[in-house]
């Protein structure tokens, strides 16, 4: 036998073995990542429409609501008809300084994430039986950012903050560019071998999968993109923009209104509270179920910081004095919302961790086939998502300080109503799949979705 013949004879079985292994792996991958057959948001056309509308809405709010005026309730119709009012054409929406500000901001957060010590916690068990680890240090990032802002104001004066306020259009465009580039990268990288895909993001339609998120936990080493962007650029960025608005109001008018102080305190408290419970994001559907695509990326890099800071931005240009009576009313509304939101969430958390805890052991529950318990009394006996109700009430309390002259600062309430209704429906669907008959039993005991006796 020639050398060549011997080589072929020796390599043929191993080549066949390799081929078999590859086929086996391919089969396992296909079983682990089944095709998505149901599509949300009316599929690809809906996804395309949402992408266009979200960009339009973001620009419309900022180009139409300036120091010179903001649309009132009737103005909303006009806003829809002619949404953009760019000062000198579309090109005025971009400036490299905006990009520098946004890239600098992300670098700061990235630096804090990597350098500031934090504890590592495990996420939920994934479909492939593995768990991932996450570094918890977002609260430190918020505190250090706040100290950085205070130091910046002390040493550099108001200019850098007023600059961001005045150039917000450029910062928004930068956010949009970064969110788009990141989404394209995430979608492309999801085709690398061995990826765990989101069950809802593998339809095979590129536009839909790009929008909804294809890969479940995109990572580079231990850096988890979804976890990083869920709480940091959006929530902390929102507070930084609020701070810029307060500085702008003070620099322009020489004082801070009670309404500005109220909104700042309410929203900072909300973010502080969320980041104090950072690890609880690991059990939300965003982390356990949704892939990371355009929807979450744009939401966290653009909609949260720029959309949620509209109230303070509005107040910077349109100061509104509330007086003691209105302040007291709004404060009570905020406290009521926070009480529902926090006690409902804590009750569930505590019960899930230790049902024998004295504060929750009186609660009635259903033992499910899945091994978990569904609470049927206490907060979770009033409505199946009573925590959303509290969150929504707080949202109203954040908008009311802006008065009634314009609809723009009420964007948060309107958007949040739609978001919570849609989110509740999605969770309801997932719980049906997870719990089957047990969930139907729970629904019979607790018939209300979000607002007890109303909805
Ligand atoms: P929830 O915290 O309400 O969690 C829902 C999950 O809890 C269900 O999937 C189920 O999961 C479990 N569950 C449901 N009913 C019961 C019950 N009766 N007893 C025990 N467990 C139950 O939802 P989210 O993750 O959507 O929201 C978390 C918080 O974040 C909320 O307070 C919400 O308001 C807030 N939020 C804020 C947003 C913002 O932009 N400001 C956006 C989105 C959310 P399982 O059984 O598998 O554990």
Image: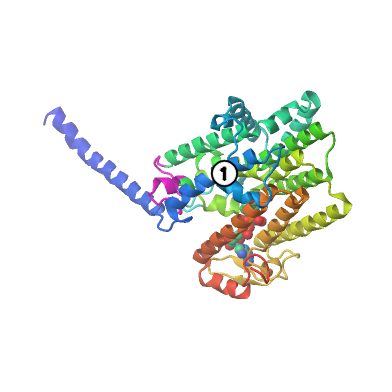
Residue 435: x %, y % from top left: 53, 67
Colour scheme in use: rainbow
Taking depth in this image into account, of 274 and 193 the one nearest to the observer is 274
Residue 196 located within the stretch drawn in magenta: yes
Q: Could you tell me which residue is drawn at 67 percent across and 63 percent down?
A: 386
Q: Magenta region, mostly helix, strand or loop?
A: loop
- Magenta segment range? 191-210
On the picture, is 248 further left or further right than 50? right
> Label 1: which residue?
82
Residue 430, relative to residue 121: is it above or below?
Answer: below
For ligand 1, give the image quadrant: bottom right
Which quarter of the rendered picture does the N terminus lie within?
A: top left
Of residues 6 and 203, the one nearer the viewer is: 203
Q: Is residue 51 left or right of residue 110?
A: left
* Residue 277 coordinates in the image, percent (x, y): 69, 49
Kindly give the residue lying farthest to the right in the view shown.
324
User: Is residue 124 something one can see in this rendering?
Assistant: no
Q: Quadrant of residue 320?
A: top right
Left or right placement of residue 283 versus residue 116 in this view: left
Q: Quadrant of the C terminus?
A: bottom right
Residue 197: say if magenta.
yes
Q: Secondary structure at mark 1?
A: loop
Q: Position of residue 61 (x, y in %)?
A: 63, 43
Which corner quadrant of the image does residue 138 belong to?
top right
Q: Is residue 75 above or below residue 161?
A: below
Q: How many marks overall?
A: 1
């Amino acid at each position: 036998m020639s050398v060549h013949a011997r080589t072929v004879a020796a390599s043929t079985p191993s080549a066949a073995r390799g081929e078999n292994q590859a086929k086996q792996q391919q089969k396992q991958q296909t079983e682990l990542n089944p095709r998505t057959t149901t599509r949300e948001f009316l599929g690809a056309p809906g996804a395309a429409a949402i992408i266009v509308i979200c960009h339009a809405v973001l620009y419309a709010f900022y180009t139409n609501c300036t120091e010179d005026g903001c649309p009132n309730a009737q103005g909303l119709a006009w806003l829809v008809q002619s949404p953009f009012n760019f000062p000198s054409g579309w090109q005025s929406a971009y400036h490299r300084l905006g990009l520098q500000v946004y890239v600098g901001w992300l670098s700061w957060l990235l630096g804090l994430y990597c350098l500031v010590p934090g504890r590592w916690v495990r996420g939920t068990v994934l479909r492939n039986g593995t768990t991932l680890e996450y570094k918890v240090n977002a609260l430190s990032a918020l505190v250090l950012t706040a100290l950085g802002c205070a130091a910046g104001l002390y040493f550099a004066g108001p200019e850098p903050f007023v600059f961001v306020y005045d150039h917000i259009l450029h910062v928004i465009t930068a956010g949009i560019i970064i969110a788009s580039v990141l989404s394209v990268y995430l979608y492309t990288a999801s085709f690398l071998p061995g990826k765990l895909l989101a069950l809802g993001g593998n339809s095979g339609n590129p536009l839909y999968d790009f929008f909804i998120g294809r890969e479940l936990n995109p990572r580079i080493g231990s850096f988890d993109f979804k976890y990083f962007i869920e709480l940091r650029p959006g929530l902390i960025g929102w507070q930084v923009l609020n701070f810029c608005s307060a500085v702008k109001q003070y620099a322009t008018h020489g004082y801070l209104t009670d309404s500005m102080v109220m909104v700042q305190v309410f929203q900072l408290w909300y973010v502080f509270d969320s980041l104090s419970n950072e690890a609880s994001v690991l059990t939300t559907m965003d982390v356990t179920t949704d892939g990371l695509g355009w929807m979450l990326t744009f939401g966290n890099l653009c909609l949260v910081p720029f959309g949620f800071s509209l109230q303070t931005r509005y107040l910077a240009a349109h100061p509104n004095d509330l007086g003691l009576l209105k302040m007291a009313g709004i404060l009570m509304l905020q406290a009521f919302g926070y009480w529902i939101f926090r006690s409902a969430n804590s009750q569930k958390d505590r019960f899930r961790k230790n049902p024998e805890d004295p504060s929750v052991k009186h609660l009635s529950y259903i033992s499910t086939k899945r091994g978990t318990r569904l609470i049927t009394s206490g907060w979770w006996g009033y409505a199946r998502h009573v925590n959303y109700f509290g969150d929504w009430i707080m949202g109203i309390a954040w908008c009311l300080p802006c008065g009634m002259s314009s609809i723009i600062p009420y964007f948060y309430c309107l958007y949040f109503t739609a978001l919570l209704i849609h989110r509740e429906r999605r969770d309801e669907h997932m719980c049906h799949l997870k719990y089957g008959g047990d969930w139907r039993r729970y629904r019979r005991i607790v018939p209300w979705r979000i607002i007890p006796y109303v909805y």
